[in-house]
Image (cartoon, rainbow, N blue to C red):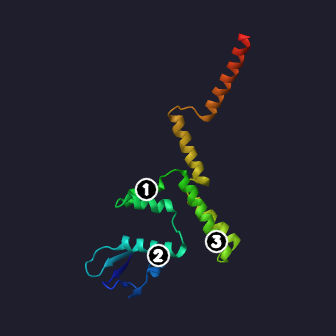
C-alpha cells in the first residue's frame, strides 16, 4: 500500500517514491492497481475518500461527465449515507445498466473518432466492458437461469404456462359460442 501524505499547503507527498505527487499521479497509481491511502500529515486523519472524490471531480471537469447524472444525483440525495446510495444506484432498475452501456459506447466511439483507439481495439474494449455488466450477455443468461429456478421451486406459472392457459381459454370460448348458437 502506498501512503500519500497531505501537507497543510495541500501538497501531496508519496512516501514510497519520496517525491511530491499530483492528483493525476494518484489517478495513475490507482489505474495501475496500486492501493493508495492519503493521510493528513499534521493530524494523521485518513483523507483517502476525500482525495478520491476530488479526483472524480477533476475527471468530471476534464471529461464532461465521467459518471451518469443519475449516479451523481443519487449520491447527493443520500447525503452522508454514501454506501447505501451507491448500492441503491447499482441495484436500480435495468435502465441504469442500459445507461451505463450507452455511455460506454459513446466514450469508446469518441476515442475511436479521435484516433486514440483503432476500430478493432474499440470493439474489443467495448466487448470486455459490456461483459462486466451484470445485465448483459452471459451474465444475463445466468440471471435468467436463476429466475427460472426460483419460479420452478415456487411452482409459479411461466409465460409458456400462461400462454397455454390463454390458448385453452380461447378454444373453450369458441366451443361455448358454438354450443350457444
Residue occupying image coordinates x 41% and y 61%: 76
Q: Label 3 crowding class (10 Å Cα cut-off): few <14, some 14-19, many 20+?
A: some
Is 44 above or below relative to 107? Answer: below
Q: Which residue is mark 3?
A: 110
| SS class, disc 2 | helix
| SS class, disc 1 | helix
Picture quarter with the C terminus? top right
Q: Label 1 crowding class (10 Å Cα cut-off): few <14, some 14-19, many 20+?
A: few
Cα gap from disc 2 to disc 3, whole angstroms? 19 Å
Q: Quadrant of residue 149?
A: top right
Q: Quadrant of residue 103?
A: bottom right
Q: How many marks?
A: 3
Q: Which mark is residue 141?
A: none
Answer with mark 2 or mark 3, whichever residue precedes in sequence.
2
Q: Nearer the viewer, mark 1 or mark 3?
A: 3
Residue 147 drawn at (x, y percent): 54, 42
Q: Which residue is mark 1?
A: 87
Picture quarter with the N terminus? bottom left
Q: Which residue is mark 2?
A: 58
- Tell whether 51 sits left or right of 129: left
Q: Do tag 2 and tag 3 residues touch (Cβ < 8 Å)?
A: no
Amino acid at each position: 500500500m502506498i501512503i500519500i501524505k497531505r501537507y497543510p499547503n495541500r501538497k501531496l507527498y508519496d512516501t514510497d517514491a519520496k517525491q511530491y505527487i499530483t492528483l493525476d499521479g494518484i489517478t495513475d497509481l490507482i489505474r495501475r492497481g496500486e492501493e493508495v491511502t492519503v493521510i493528513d500529515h499534521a493530524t494523521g486523519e485518513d483523507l483517502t475518500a476525500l482525495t478520491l472524490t476530488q479526483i472524480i471531480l477533476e475527471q468530471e471537469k476534464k471529461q464532461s461527465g465521467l459518471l451518469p447524472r443519475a449516479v451523481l444525483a443519487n449520491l447527493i440525495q443520500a447525503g452522508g449515507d454514501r454506501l447505501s446510495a451507491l448500492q441503491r444506484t447499482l441495484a436500480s432498475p435495468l435502465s441504469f445498466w442500459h445507461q451505463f452501456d450507452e455511455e460506454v459506447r459513446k466514450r469508446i466511439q469518441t476515442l475511436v473518432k479521435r484516433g486514440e483507439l483503432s476500430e478493432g481495439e474499440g470493439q474489443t474494449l467495448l466487448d470486455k466492458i459490456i461483459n462486466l455488466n451484470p445485465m448483459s450477455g452471459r451474465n444475463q443468461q445466468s440471471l435468467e437461469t436463476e429466475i427460472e429456478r426460483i419460479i420452478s421451486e415456487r411452482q409459479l406459472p411461466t409465460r409458456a404456462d400462461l400462454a397455454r392457459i390463454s390458448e385453452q381459454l380461447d378454444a373453450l370460448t369458441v366451443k361455448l359460442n358454438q354450443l350457444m348458437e
